[in-house]
Amino acid sequence: MNKKIYAPIKITLEKDKRYAWCTCSHSEKQPFCDGTHRAHEKPGSLGFVAETNNEVWLCTCKHTGNPPYCDGTHKTL
């Protein structure tokens, strides 16, 4: 049985910078939105502003309970 692995992506966020996290999983620029959701008639991105300069793990499975950050849910899919 082959399961697709949705490992989180480690990103360095810049304080006060605006980001658009992909919510549809179709973006070619994971974990960020590239507008592909429009062609798939999916909801848009989740915008957020980094509060600090920090390395974080952003979710790619889109099932996290703490979007856009990974909470480990991908391990149970």
Image (cartoon, rainbow, N blue to C red):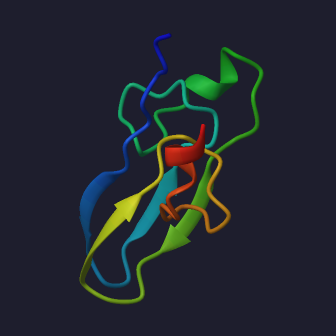
Q: Residue furthest bottom?
A: 52
| Placement of 59 over or under 65, stated as above or below | above
Residue at 64 percent across and 27 percent down: it is: 37
- Residue 3, image x, y percentages: 49, 20
**Quadrant in which residue 52 is drawn:** bottom left
Image coordinates for residue 36, horizontal then vertical, percent = 55, 24
* Number of numbered discs visible in the structure rendering: 0
Q: Is residue 33 above or below residue 16?
A: above
On the image, the x and y values in percent for residue 2 come to 46, 12
Residue at 25% x, 81% y is: 54
Task: Give coordinates of residue 16: x percent, y percent.
Answer: 38, 83
User: Looking at the image, which residue is at 69% across and 41% down?
Assistant: 44
Q: Nearer the viewer, residue 57 or 33?
A: 57
Give the residue at the far front of this rendering: 1
Residue drawn at 66 percent across, 15 percent down: 39
Answer left or right for 68 relative to 6.
right
Position of the C terminus by quadrant: top right
**Would residue 36 appear left or right of 27 to someone viewing this image?**
right
Q: Which quarter of the picture shows residue 22?
A: top right
When asked about the image quadrant of residue 25, the answer is: top right
